[in-house]
Image (cartoon, rainbow, N blue to C red):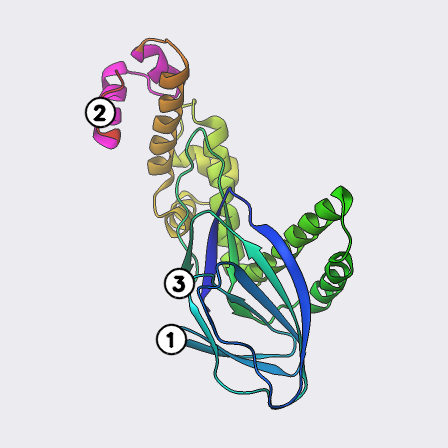
Amino acid sequence: MNKILFELPPMPYYITIGQTHYEPGQQHPNRRNLGVFDLLFVLQGALFMGEDEKQWRVSQGQSLLLLPDRHHYTTAVCAEETVFYWIHFEYNGAYREYSEPRPSLPIRHAWANPYYLKVPQHSTPRQFASIVRLLELMHEQATVNGATAYWKEQQRFMDLMQLLEEEERDDSATSSVVQLAERTEAYLRRHYQQDLTNETLADSLHFHSNYIVRCMKEVYRCTPMEYLLQYRLEQAKLLLIKTEWPIAKVGEQVGFQYAPYFSSCFKRHVGMTPL
């Protein structure tokens, strides 16, 4: 399944919603470079849509996310009465398509806390009834003006994004791998100043060290100790920027016992000395 990965922040920005009704023989308009994301939810019938080289039949109970810089076109006219909601939203951050089971997650910088929103491009949401109720509320609110209406629209759109992302969590085996990798990451970030080993993680997380390593490599494409080293260096960058501490104290503060080893690791991975 093709998915879209949004790197947050910034957050997607909701623009508007509408409902369209096609009779048999009618079709969705063809467009190039619309400039905004177009999110479709089919309530009845089916849409036959293409985006560049990809094509879909979007049936009742399904959703489709069309990207802002592509060629969108109809591959066939509607064969039956078709009703669907559409939502336009903007996103000015970095996003990419991926089709592998799970994208690797980067190590977060000390001064940033990004989140990676994963939305299937074409899906059959299990929670479609809940999505429709939310769309109905958004559609009713579309003609209301004022600050209260604005914040309700944006909040409901965020709720919608959350429901779509939850479709990613339907594989219990995959979910357990991600959950343990995220638990490991959180533990490393809380205890990075301490002397940590794979055995320490195994004792604290109650999983075999080999399984923890495998989960981290599958999700973050690195071992726990590699993640720990990178995170310590990111914390060191932050301290070097905001303090006047000597190099030895910075290294000690982020978990390095010996200043020369800290300096050599920093230069090898960052490309310059701490000084």
Nearer the N terminus, badge 1 or badge 3?
Answer: 1
For the residue pair 268 and 148, the one nearer the viewer reads as: 148
Q: Amino acid at mark 1?
A: Glu
Residue 229 location in percent, x, y? 34, 31
Number of marks drawn: 3
Residue matched to label 3: 100
Residue matched to label 2: 272
Which residue is at 58% across, 65% downward?
A: 39
- From the image, tell me which residue sits under label 1: 53
Under tag 1, what secondary structure? Answer: loop
Quadrant showing the C terminus: top left
The one nearer the camera, 99 or 140, is 140
Q: CA distance from mark 2 to mark 1?
A: 44 Å
Image vertical order of residue 185 relative to residue 129, above or below: above
The residue drawn where x is 31% and y is 11% is 248
**Mainly helix, strand or loop, the magenta region?**
helix
Of marks 3 and 2, which one's residue comes earlier in the chain?
Answer: 3
Answer whether residue 171 is visible to the viewer in this image: no
For image coordinates 64% across by 51% down, the residue present is 158
Q: Quadrant of residue 51?
A: bottom left
Residue 258 part of the magenta segment: yes
The reply, left or right, for residue 201 in relation to residue 137 is: left
Percent of width and height locating residue 213: 38, 45
- Residue at horizontal 40%, vertical 39%? 107
Identified by mark 2, the residue type is Met
Q: Secondary structure at mark 3?
A: loop
User: Mark 2 vs mark 1: which is more N-terminal?
Assistant: 1
Q: Position of residue 17 (x, y in %)?
A: 66, 62
Camera-nearest residue between 70 and 249: 70
The magenta stretch spans which residues? 247-269
